[in-house]
């Protein structure tokens, strides 16, 4: 059985996925950090990979730095196998860092990627995805035990109903730090 092939975009010096005998990992970044396999500007299309090359793509805190989210998602769709997963973390629109970071181009909500599903009547692209998982993260400071416990409880509550939480709870809770998506490629 062949190993799963994983592409991690923008790992910098701290990749989310470690190299292993269980899967083949390729690290792509726009800067040649130690361990980066390919250097490429993600604003330049097409990406330097074959169609249907990857089983999983990891893009943690990358997509918010890119101008054309639709084109990026189309390109990720192209290089991911049918049924493959794209795992994304981005700042939530209510986060102070969503547009507070100098290089962030856009903000995201839990409904941002619905335009690529059958649920939405607005069609800006020909590619199709299924949203497998969405998780709101409230506060990402694990080094403080009391905050970790409060965070656990708040995240349980805010992930019961995303629309309600975004509409009524994000600002009283001083915003949500990030959103985690798992998106399945459909071809």
Image (spheres, rainbow, N blue to C red):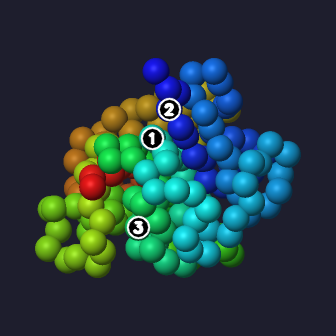
Q: Quadrant of the C terminus?
A: bottom left
Image position, residue 80 (x, y; %): 43, 51
Is 104 on the left-hand or right-hand side of 127? right
Asked if marks 1 and 3 touch (Cβ < 8 Å), the reply is no
Question: Would you call the spot at circle 2 few (<14 residues within 10 Å), some (14-19), or many (20 or more)?
Answer: few
Mark 3 secondary-structure assignment: helix
| Residue identifier under label 1 | 55
Image position, residue 49 (x, y; %): 57, 57
Which residue appears at 39% of the width and 33% of the height? 153
Q: Earlier in the sequence, mark 2 or mark 1?
A: 2
**From this viewpoint, is residue 29 visible?**
yes
Q: Earlier in the sequence, mark 1 or mark 3?
A: 1
Spatial CA span between label 2 and label 1: 6 Å
Asked if marks 2 and 1 touch (Cβ < 8 Å), the reply is yes
Q: Observer-nearest residue: 129 or 46?
A: 46
Q: Is residue 67 above or below residue 143?
A: below
Mark 1 secondary-structure assignment: strand
Which residue appears at 73% of the width and 42% of the height? 14
Question: Would you call the spot at circle 3 few (<14 residues within 10 Å), some (14-19), or many (20 or more)?
Answer: some
Q: Observer-nearest residue: 91 or 73?
A: 73
Q: Is residue 78 above or below residue 160?
A: below
Q: Earlier in the sequence, mark 3 or mark 2?
A: 2
Which residue appears at 49% of the width and 45% of the height? 54
| Residue identifier under label 3 | 74
User: Where on the picture, by quarter, is residue 93?
Assistant: bottom left
Q: Observer-nearest residue: 4 or 71?
A: 4
**From this viewpoint, is residue 95 visible?**
no
The label on residue 4 is: 2
Is 112 on the left-hand or right-hand side of 39? left
Which residue appears at 43% of the width and 51% of the height? 52
Spatial CA span between label 1 and label 3: 16 Å
């Amino acid at each position: 059985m062949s190993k799963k092939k994983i592409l991690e975009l923008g790992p910098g010096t701290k990749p989310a996925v470690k190299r292993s005998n269980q899967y083949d990992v390729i690290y792509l970044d726009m800067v040649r950090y130690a361990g980066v396999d390919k250097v490429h500007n993600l604003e330049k299309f097409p990406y330097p990979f074959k169609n249907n090359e990857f089983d999983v793509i990891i893009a943690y805190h990358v997509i918010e730095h890119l101008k054309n989210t639709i084109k990026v998602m189309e390109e990720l769709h192209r290089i991911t196998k049918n049924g493959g997963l794209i795992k994304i973390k981005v700042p939530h629109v209510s986060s102070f860092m969503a547009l507070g970071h100098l290089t962030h181009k856009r903000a995201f909500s839990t409904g941002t990627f619905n335009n690529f599903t059958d649920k939405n009547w607005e069609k800006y692209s020909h590619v199709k995805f299924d949203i497998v998982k969405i998780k709101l993260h409230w506060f990402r400071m694990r080094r403080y035990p009391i905050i970790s416990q409060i965070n656990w409880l708040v995240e349980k509550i805010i992930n019961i109903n995303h629309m309600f939480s975004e509409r009524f709870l994000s600002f009283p809770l001083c915003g949500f730090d990030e959103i985690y998506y798992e998106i399945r490629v459909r071809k």
